[in-house]
Image: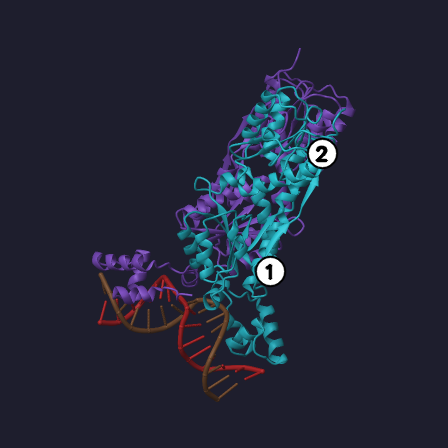
Chain colours: A cyan, B purple, C red, D brown
Amino acid sequence: MNQKITIRDVARIAGVSSATVSYVINGVNKVSEETKARVLQTIAELNYQPDFTAISLSKKKSNMIGVMIPLVEGSLAPIFRENHYYSELISGIEFVSRKNGYDFLLSGFGKPEDCKNWVMKRNLDGLVFLGSFPESIYQELKALSMPIVLIDTYEEYAKHYTNIRIDDERGGYLATKHLIEYGHRSIGFVSPGPVNNPIDSLRLKGFQQALKEANLPFQDAFVFEGKDSSFENGYQIGKNIIKAELPITAIFAAADILALGIIKAFNEADKKVPIDYSVIGYDDLLVSRYASPSLTTISQDVFKKGAISAEMLISTIEKKETEFKTFCLPVELVIRDSTSRIQC
Amino acid sequence: MNQKITIRDVARIAGVSSATVSYVINGVNKVSEETKARVLQTIAELNYQPDFTAISLSKKKSNMIGVMIPLVEGSLAPIFRENHYYSELISGIEFVSRKNGYDFLLSGFGKPEDCKNWVMKRNLDGLVFLGSFPESIYQELKALSMPIVLIDTYEEYAKHYTNIRIDDERGGYLATKHLIEYGHRSIGFVSPGPVNNPIDSLRLKGFQQALKEANLPFQDAFVFEGKDSSFENGYQIGKNIIKAELPITAIFAAADILALGIIKAFNEADKKVPIDYSVIGYDDLLVSRYASPSLTTISQDVFKKGAISAEMLISTIEKKETEFKTFCLPVELVIRDSTSRIQC
DNA sequence: TTGAAAGCGCTAACAC
DNA sequence: GTGTTAGCGCTTTCAA
């Protein structure tokens, strides 16, 4: 194996000291144009590649950021497998990181201790958290003045950090308004879990807001709380809705995957979507586009979410950004085939 | 920020030299039980965490592996977004890496030069390639005695490396046999691209094999070559099939996403699946489970593929494994609702 | 404008 | 068994 080319090789061949080479690489001190040119030339000739490990050690900066992901049963697998949301988020992070010369490490979040140790061991420059973790870990990291960015954190304390989320309430509003504009007057609301969960309660709030604007009553009987965000759960809820024989003509499910399960239950009961019921989801999963009928839903730009998080993190690392900001990204109504105007 | 605890702190407090601390951590040389205990104790008390960066620099080993992913339009995004296959593969890699104390870095594959430089700059211990890249890069890395593992590489040279793929031919065979057992005699074969592509030609070979065993003729007219692996392409092909008015009763699409597009086209033409046509896919995407009708398909254990690749790579890095091996993982028929026995 | 030299935190001869 | 010490490749005072 050919010997690694070091800064000293460059120095020797260019006839300068290694300090000077370091100066031109980092653009510090004022090196004369002449020497600079010579050094640059030598670097190119030798195809010299600075060793990041050595740089990390001496600068205490690794040019690496960590991405913390919830762990399910000790593995990232379930969450990655079931939820393409994460991969899209990571695409965004990757895109921006790479553009800025950073690499990123993925890690499942186990114990807060492990997280902190990992950061120290790897000399990470910053961290982005996908989802909510114990607040204590954020505080500890903040105390170490480690830049962090939170994604989808709705807790009160989020405002003390840079955090990025979407406008859930507006999405709920848009979805409901769409159904109302299509002539629906009795609309069911399906939540993946208890509606007091921060996300779902915002979506519900938007739902209520739209009803109010249209002078429609909000009825508790039309609200269904599931036990999780899954196809199976949606399927169960769908069956319950049929059984309940409520006078509703449309359903707003606060998660696409629920909506798909609901539609399946409807199909089995020989209820057609969108003829018998209009159904709208939330999230715009890839699946939703390919389902039949394709699902009307509320969409967010997940890639952008990842990209912004990485941008903010890197800005903070490089001291271009010093304040904590909250980004509430817009959502959009995507009309497909699962909703239709009510038949009079 | 509290000062970082170094090996010297531990040494000082335990009343030994830093070398001794290093010895007990790495289990080299024989340190007396007594000193060992004392050092371990001190390490625990101080919660000392060895600095990976420093270790990397001095050992020339980073405990990091790189994962190379094809780049589309300069970003990982499209491939991640459209193809949950990659995220699942990565889950497997993550799972095994973490268990073995490795981290992994993701990178899109741009120029071979960049890849090599990246490996050197980051001191990576090994590399796994997802998909096919120019062979030259494998050779270069091999020349640097950098352990590598290839996933889904069908080229002849693959056997000179550790490589992992699935038994595509058997999948084609199983799919076709299933249709034949359901009574179908005239079966169409749809390939994402030209059937001379290594993967698709294997799947086609399995198809032909099953036909032959059942004494059914292979007809060129029943083979459709698409232009890529996409829903839209499947949709187009589906329309063409309808238009062609071929006397077929079943279709084997060599990719799920095509199958879904085909089904959509059939639906629009008022042909029902599986009543009018049985359709079977290949890949077992997550989508396929939630589609209606849910898709009968050939499934592979993608997580396992990732896990094995990481295991082999780490074994090679740690010199437990020195030979190149080819892993051809089994596939499985998953029967769902898009295929049915032919109506007489 | 440049260079000498002392680290960064750890490892690994080599010596005792 | 344990300690001394010279690196690993780079940065960064400090002095010239």
For this view, does A56 lie left or right of residue B258? Answer: left
Q: Which residue sits at x=27%, y=60%?
A: B39
Q: Which residue sits at x=57%, y=40%?
A: A201
Q: Position of residue B94 (x, y in %)?
A: 48, 45
Q: Amino acid at mark 2?
A: Ile
- The answer to whether tags 2 and 1 share a subunit is yes
Quadrant of the snapshot with the N terminus of chain B: bottom left
Residue at the farthest right position: B243
Q: Amino acid at mark 1?
A: Asn
- Badge count: 2
Q: With respect to residue A167, does A278 lie above or below?
A: above
- Looking at the rendering, which quadrant does residue A101 occupy? bottom right
Nearer to the camera, A77 or A190: A190
For this view, does B274 lie left or right of residue A231? Answer: right
For this view, does A53 lie left or right of residue A172? Answer: left
First along the sequence among labels 2 and 1: 1
Q: Position of residue B98 (x, y in %)?
A: 43, 47
Residue designated by label 2: A180
Answer few, some or many: residues within 10 Å of disc 2's Cα (few below 14, many 20 plus, some between 14 and 19).
Answer: many
Residue A260 seen from this side: yes
Q: Position of residue A42 (x, y in %)?
A: 59, 72
Q: Mark 1 belongs to which subunit?
A: A
Residue designated by label 1: A100
Question: What secondary structure is found at the residue carrying circle 1?
Answer: loop
Residue B112 seen from this side: no
Nearer to the camera, B211 or A98: A98
- Looking at the rendering, which quadrant does residue A14 occupy? bottom right
Circle 2 or circle 1, nearest the eye: 2
